[in-house]
Image (tube, grey):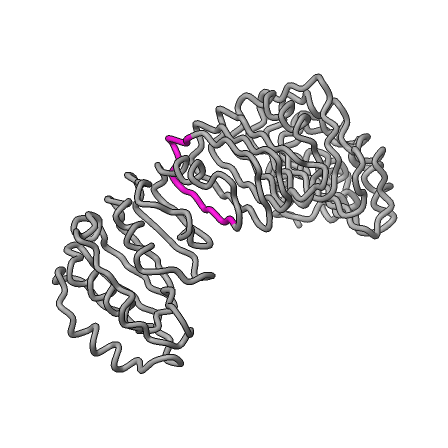
Amino acid sequence: MDRINGLSDDVLVKILTFLPTKEAISTCVLSKRWKFLWMWLQKLEYMCREPESREFIDKNLPLHRALVIERVRIDVSSDSNIEPKDYIRWIRILVSRQIRVLIIDNHLIHGRNILPSSLYTCKSLVGLILKGPILLNVPRMVCLPSLKTLGLEGGTDVTNRFLKRLLSNCPVLENLVVDRFGCDGMRKLTVIVPSLQRLTLFLTNDLDEFVLNTPSLKQLRFRFHFSNCHFSMIEKMPELRKALVEINRFSNIDSLIASISSAEHLFICPPLEAVYSDGFVFNKLKHLKICECKAYSSSFLVRLLKGSPKLQVLESSRMLFHGSDFKDDKNDWNPPTTVPECILSSLEIVKWFIYLGRSQERDLATYILKNGRRLKAVTIESQPYYMETHDMLKELALCTRASNTCKLVFT
């Protein structure tokens, strides 16, 4: 204990930040010196799991002395007795303490406003994460000059009018997450943020209108499940580097593909074979991964390779076959008239999952090995249940390779 008492107050407060907030506050009984140390904590986490949680926060939160509170998380379970007025009271205190990051994980209150108007004009706020069915009733007066991260997750309820008002008053917003946005009243979604660099959209409800204009975007996660969009306008994203696209139905798929054409890393799920044409070109694409959730034809893969002249890494999966799943179709592979540029000049790594060893797969694998001048490694995940692994390994191992340094690995 003497060694600990020899430390400065700043160091002791730093140590307290590694403890759960409730335990850190309990150290006030150790001695007179420790009585007030917890009040200088800049990171707080209140886990409201029992009826006494409200009294605990009401007693301790107003006592904090830190001029700036870096991060506060309030996690409210269905077993607590927290009410909207409690949230509003606590958040007002945090705003007065120059809160920088606020995370609310709400599992209790459904469809009610729990945010005071003062939060929407908090100049110090850098991050705001809302989880659960929280109603966002955005006031007319909004000014969040420092907000860089905004998360609306777990069914946060906000109309398009309020969302547009909120986003248009966040001039330096860089990271936006709209996850599980399945609110019945949400028929339009507009995201126009010139400063945005990272965007995650997970939409589960049908939309009448979808507008996306994010010219500075670098990372996109677009998940559109079991939904349809009757009208969409998606502007190009010239700064885009990484894109993950998961869609089942989308009215303007051409616009979506064109908008992500500058990506260097692309993950597609499921394969967009029915709508992908030869006209799309990914001039900067280096890493392409195609989800294995759905089979696709070798011709679709070749079209992707033709449109990706600088591709270095390809992660592919099972090919689509006509007829029975276990039938070996010997007439499905039609080699392209010209070898895709990426196979000749840039492709280095190929990873093939759920390889069944059927004719078009063998022909395509052989084609890549014979023409891949810069290949370094081809890894194939075989399925011995469907085929003779030894025969497959022997046939491909004896195949001519354009690259003398290419390693063929079976897993």
In the rendered image of this protein, does residue 209 appear above or below residue 170?
Answer: below
Q: Is residue 245 left or right of residue 408?
A: right
Q: Quadrant of residue 358?
A: bottom left
Q: Is residue 403 left or right of residue 278?
A: left
Q: Position of residue 234 (x, y in %)?
A: 48, 32
In the rendered image of this protein, does residue 406 appear above or below residue 243?
Answer: below
Q: Position of residue 25 (x, y in %)?
A: 75, 43
Q: Residue at x 73, y 32 (%)?
A: 136
In the rendered image of this protein, does residue 299 appear above or below residue 392?
Answer: above
Q: Quadrant of residue 294?
A: bottom left
Q: Residue at x 80, y 36 (%)?
A: 112
In the rendered image of this protein, does residue 56 appear above or below residue 393?
Answer: above
Q: Residue at x 50, y 31 (%)?
A: 233
Magenta highlight on residue 242: yes
Q: Position of residue 221 (x, y in %)?
A: 49, 43
Look at the image and tell me whether residue 248 can be seen.
yes
Q: In this picture, which residue range is highlighted in magenta?
A: 236-247
Look at the image and tell me whether residue 73 can be seen.
no
Q: Position of residue 174 (x, y in %)?
A: 51, 30
- Quadrant placement of the C terminus: bottom left
Magenta highlight on residue 364: no
Q: Nearer the viewer, residue 356 or 19?
A: 356
Q: Nearer the viewer, residue 375 or 33?
A: 375
Q: Is residue 200 left or right of residue 89?
A: left
Q: Residue at x 42, y 74 (%)?
A: 324
